[in-house]
Image (cartoon, rainbow, N blue to C red):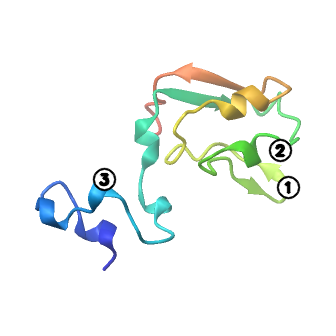
Amino acid sequence: MAIHDRINEKSPWTDITEGNKIYEAATSRDFCTGEWRTSTPIWDDEKCRQCLLCAPVCPDSSIPVRKGERMDFDYMHCKGCGICAKVCPFGAIYMREGKNEKIF
């Protein structure tokens, strides 16, 4: 059983790691960090030229690329930093205040 499966809001303080850090590898997909978002990136696929400048700058790998084309955001992990919107030269990504309620 992985540490992130054992620790929850009812865990005694003695079971919680310092700073609630997770020391095991490959666990980021298990956490819905998109809930932290206060702004949501919106992708306009009609404006998008598939230049893929946005995907490598995403710190959360929340812009999936399949067969050489970007897909819509992985909102379960996107924290809404807005870096993708800043680097898009075509205005195909813009930030909307708040969370997209359809996602959660």
Tell me which numbered mark, 1 or 2, is placed earlier along the sequence.
Answer: 2
Residue 103 has which mark? none
Circle nearer the viewer, 1 or 3: 3
Three-letter code for the amino acid on which mark 1 is drawn: Gly
For disc 3, the neighbor class at 10 Å (few under 14, some 14 to 19, many from 20) is: few
Q: Return the residue found at the far top.
A: 97
Q: Return the residue found at the far bottom.
A: 1
Query: For the residues marked 1 and 3, what is the alpha-carbon distance in whole angstroms?
Result: 39 Å
User: Tag 3's secondary structure?
Assistant: helix
User: Tag 2's secondary structure?
Assistant: loop
Three-letter code for the amino acid on which mark 3 is drawn: Gly
**Where residue 100 sits: x, y (%)?**
48, 30
**Where residue 62 sits: x, y (%)?**
62, 48
Mark 2, residue position: 52
Mark 1, residue position: 68
Three-letter code for the amino acid on which mark 2 is drawn: Leu
Query: For the residues marked 1 and 2, what is the alpha-carbon distance in whole angstroms?
Result: 8 Å
Left of 44 or right of it: where is 79?
Answer: left
Which residue sits at x=88%, y=41%?
A: 51
User: Tag 1's secondary structure?
Assistant: loop
**Where residue 50 sits: x, y (%)?**
86, 41
Most foreground residue, 62 or 24:
24
Residue 19 has which mark? 3
Circle nearer the viewer, 3 or 2: 3
Q: Is residue 39 visible?
A: yes
Position above or below: 30 against 61: below
Q: Is residue 104 visible?
A: no
**Where residue 78 sits: x, y (%)?**
54, 42
Tell me which numbered mark, 3 or 2, is placed earlier along the sequence.
Answer: 3
Q: Please say if the residues under marks 1 and 2 sit with CB atoms less than 8 Å apart.
A: yes
